Image (cartoon, grey):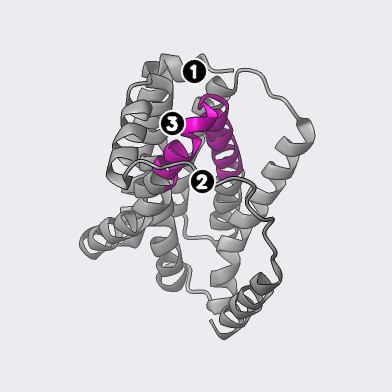
Amino acid sequence: FAVQSALYLVAFIALFGVRLPPRTAPPAARPPMRDAAREGARYVFGRPALRALVVASVMTGLFQLGPIFVLIPEIARTRLEVDAALNSLLLAFTSIGMLIMSAFLAKRGGLGRKGYWFLVNLLVAGPAMVVMGISGWYPLTAVALFVWGLNGGVHINMNQALIQMNTPNEMMGRVMSIYMLSIAGLIPLGSLMSGVTAEIIGADGALMLAGVVFGVYSVWAFFAERELKALD
């Protein structure tokens, strides 16, 4: 935590060197925040494909990111019985997977049938989480987290790309705000739900349950979200 705090301090100090260009025209009048948020929500939920992408983000925050962040360290400590270094290394495997997949997608360039592949990718996360919950062997848990990281690289990049490609510039800020709220804003709630569940059925059981819930959702989305599947 001390190292992280120092790095944040360095980044904060570096911000003082940023110089913004002068405004060439006065900013246009903006609607009240409540009206803007209502208009953004109406735009998103009035379009089935965008709505499906936001729902996927909600499910990811509640049943993937929230559970993983709070349960994996507990499973590593109590079931795998590893020290702090190996415990932290588990989530590093996730980051490595995300980095590799993000680099691959960036190098590959345009990918056809983006909506279809996004939905196919959703099908991987649930089983990977179930494996994490079942596993009592550190290497298997590490591989599952690496696969989950690859999956996350596809999810994050494609989700944002599909939203931005199908949103006009004048609505971009409002739509992206809803997207960020739907995933990052719900991680603490997902962690809370998983923590309460872990008190009842254990951390491994809570992670498996989250994986099953997300797996059921992903199968439903693959067959039901036709507008999203058609996006290119």
Looking at the image, tell me whether mark 3 or mark 1 is earlier in sequence order. 3
Q: Nearer the viewer, residue 111 or 7?
A: 7
Amino acid at pointer 1:
Lys
Where does label 1 land, which residue? 229
Residue 102, picture quadrant: top right
Front label number (2 vs 1): 2
Q: Where residue 106 appears, x then y in whole percent?
A: 74, 38
Front label number (3 vs 1): 3
Q: Where residue 200 appears, x then y in whole percent?
A: 20, 61
Residue 194, picture quadrant: bottom left
What label does residue 27 carry, if any? 2
Q: Report helix, strand or loop for mark 1.
A: helix
Looking at the image, tell me whether mark 2 or mark 1 is earlier in sequence order. 2
Q: Is residue 97 visible?
A: yes
The residue lying furthest to the right in this view is 107
What label does residue 65 carry, if any? none
Tell me which residue sits at (42%, 42%) in the image.
Answer: 29
Q: Report helix, strand or loop for mark 3.
A: helix
Q: CA distance from mark 3 to mark 1?
A: 11 Å
Looking at the image, tell me whether mark 3 or mark 2 is earlier in sequence order. 2
Q: Where residue 107 appears, x then y in whole percent?
A: 79, 36
Above or below, 83 against 117 in this view is: below
Above or below, 194 against 230 in this view is: below
Tell me which residue sits at (43%, 36%) in the image.
Answer: 175
Amino acid at pointer 2:
Pro
